[in-house]
Amino acid sequence: MKFAQVMDYIEERNKLGSVPGLDNIKGLLERLGNPEKGIPAFHIAGTNGKGSIMAYVESVLIEAGYKVGRYISPTIIDYRERWQINKRYISKKECAEILTEVIDAVGRMEEEGAGRPTSFEIETAAAFLWFNKSECDIILIECGMGGRLDATNVFETTPIDILASISFDHMQFLGETLEEITREKLGIMKKGDILVSYPQSEIPERIIDEFAAENIEVKTVGNTNGSNNEDSSISEKLSRRYFKADISEISDVSESLDKTGFVYKGEKYTIHLAGGAQVLNAITAIEAIDAFNSISENYGFEEIPLKTVKAGLRKTRWQGRFTVLNKEPLFIVDGAHNEDAWKKLSADVRKYFTNRKLIYIIGVLGDKEYPKMLDMLTPDMYSAFTVTTDSPRALDGNVLAGLIRERGVRAVYAESVEKAVEDAFSLAKETPDSVIIACGTLSFAGDVIRSVRSYLKK
């Protein structure tokens, strides 16, 4: 099949939606020779920050000389972005060849009555197949949703499992409480795996600590907990198979839109991803590399020296995360798409842009907590342009504009992302001290990036 043909096939498969469960993906991988086996992997679950943490880890591993496969979900700019080796997208030719092989296996499954894989299951199988054929040294695998029943959760053992920030999202699949959601994310853990965790809020941290105490063999490590747990003995008996990013070890933070400097455990680091959460994402990646070093000899790898870790973090770039697209007028795009991400975006906006006139471009999904987003953003909002995103789950942009106007802010519905970008630039040019901020979903962020690039070429 040619690239256009496999894209048509995937588009048709998208109609199946999300179907949590592992039977389909395991059956599909078995028919492909189980390409997921034999390659050391970092496996990450979480609500927000998965992409940023893996971008840091990827950059460090590449800096250390490894051939690194990375599987991303969702994508922002290009469909092929989900499959990368050393930051290079799979080519259209390779993509067509790999997907054709997977689609043929799907056909055999369906003829046998053994299941009907979804597009995400097909894409996940394709990732493992491509990385295996390409002889990657290490692979980085990002859960699509949840963890326990996510199609990526097919490893018999994963050397390192990472939990990014955990908060509310996809509750219809993962549960209505943070306890339930956290346990679903912890479902990626297998016996013998190392666990690395972002500095979580109180409830997820408690659940993770309890899980670690019950399931991980222990030595003795000091209290790495930045919050107040009633029973600090849980932390005191955790082994070096449980690595917790420690907010109490962060100091000397200096932030700007261009770079952020900080000290972690006495060492100075510089990163170029903006936003308050990025320091926390970076220290989680540092802990993940520390975890890798603790077992590197088992896989015939050398430990990664500190100078390489620092260089890798410094070279990390990641699109759609408080990204500056233009400097005059200033244009920021952020993929914030749930309550926790909007809260962090709101805090960053207040930190960086005090007393600036904030012009928003917003497109959201109808099944998200968008009223809460508006309650967070509209108090500082000068004006807004709304868009109906390119998704069957999209909230009508006219409805969104009405909700913003109800909160006392001028809002105009734009018929396309291109029109919203053009109008926002026009307004910003005639409004002193203005900043344009686009947000709502990750896919919408990709549409905005493409539209801004096109606008700036005119």
Image (spheres, rainbow, N blue to C red):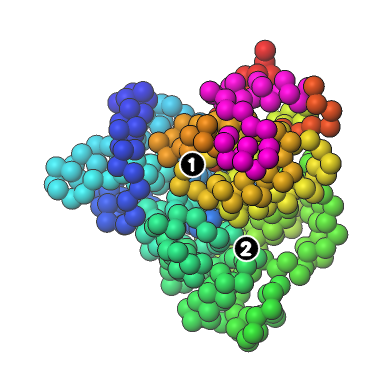
In the picture, measured across the screen, residue 458 lies left or right of residue 400, that is: right
Q: Which amino acid does label 2 sit on?
A: Tyr
The residue indicated by pointer 2 is 198
Of helix, strand and loop, which one carries label 1? loop
Q: Are marks 2 and 1 in contact (CB under 8 Å)?
A: no
Q: Is residue 35 visible?
A: yes
- C-alpha separation, residue under disc 2 versus residue under disc 1: 27 Å
In percent of width and height, residue 271 lies at 75, 48
Please name the residue shown 31% across and 57% down the image.
Answer: 22
Q: In which quarter of the image is residue 196?
A: bottom right
On screen, residue 406 above or below 235: above
Neighbours of disc 1 within 10 Å: few (<14), some (14-19), many (20+): many
Please name the residue shown 45% across and 64% down the image.
Answer: 176
Please name the residue shown 68% across and 44% down the image.
Answer: 378
Residue extent of the magenta highlight: 401-429
In percent of width and height, residue 56 lies at 65, 50
In the picture, measured across the screen, residue 55 lies left or right of residue 75, that is: right
Q: Which of marks 2 and 1 is nearer the N terminus?
A: 2
The quadrant of the image that shows the C terminus is top right
Q: Which of 303 and 143 is in front in this view?
A: 143
**Is residue 188 within the magenta segment?**
no
Q: Which mark is residue 111?
A: none
On screen, residue 356 above or below 267: above
